[in-house]
Amino acid sequence: MRKLLYSVILLAILIIPGKVFAISGTVNLKCTPTSVFAGDAINCTISGDVSDGSITDFTATTQLSDNLEFVSAATVSGWTGTSNGGIFSLKTTNSQTNVFEIANFTVKMKNDSTSSGTVTLNTTKLGEVTSVPPVSQNINLSTSTNVADTADDNAGEDVNADIKNPGTGSSIPFMVIGAGVIGAIVVYELAARKKKIYKI
């Protein structure tokens, strides 16, 4: 009976620590801006969050909706490997723990896009963590007119209107003054001629 009890205790000592101190981690994806026009670029950052241990490698694949296209990728300092076409297979010589950045990549909303899109990152390996939930971010397609441009256009129209109105009103006094001056000259000339006639 004692041998059986000892065996159970020994088995518990071997199994329980492995579960308690197992490495756990998640992958985060942040893309900005989240609202763009067709043809605009979106910058995304991949980061990890690991507790109860550290990791030295990362493998994942980006999945884009049909109206998004992959542009480029770059690893964060300390990470090396390949990231072609949004397929990441990276390693680092510095063990990573807690929260850390892994890589950056850029996607683009296609020029002929007519709807919003989604960027999804499917992680197949984060060090010893082999079960990492996929993460996604929605990218909204903006179809509204640029408010700043509209304001500038309206301001331009208002300025032109202001210039025209004063111009029309202000020309009347100048015309009156000009007519008065011309009239005075004509009267003066006529008076001068009459004086000459009388002298003769």
Image: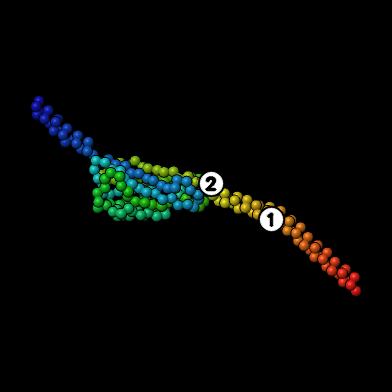
Q: Nearer the viewer, mark 2 or mark 1?
A: 1
All told, the count of numbered labels is 2
Name the secondary structure under disc 2.
Answer: loop
Q: Is residue 41 left or right of residue 173?
A: left
Q: Is residue 135 visible?
A: yes
Residue 83 point in image, percent of width and height: 35, 53
Image point 26% across, 47% down: which residue? 96
Residue furthest bottom as drawn: 200
Q: Who comes first in sequence, dot 2 or dot 1?
A: 2
Q: Where is residue 100 drawn, in percent x and y?
A: 30, 47
The three-letter code of the residue at mark 2 reads Thr
Query: What is the x, y in percent for residue 106?
Result: 41, 52
Q: Amino acid at mark 1?
A: Gly
Can residue 125 be seen at all in this image of the molecule?
no
Q: Residue furthest left?
A: 2
Image coords of residue 190 (percent x, y): 85, 67
Is residue 82 rendered to the left or right of residue 199?
left
Residue found 32% across the figure and 53% down from its top = 76
Helix, strand or loop under label 1: helix
Q: Quadrant of the N terminus?
A: top left
Which one is nearer the viewer's eye here, 97 or 13? 97
For residue 195, what is the image quadrant? bottom right
Residue for badge 2:
143
Work out whether residue 15 or residue 53 is closer to the camera in this orientation and state it.
53
Which quadrant is the C terminus positioned in? bottom right
Q: Residue at x 65, y 52 (%)?
A: 162
Q: Residue 50 lies in what quarter of the image?
A: top left
Q: Tell me the number on the disc at residue 167.
A: 1
| Colour convention of the picture | rainbow
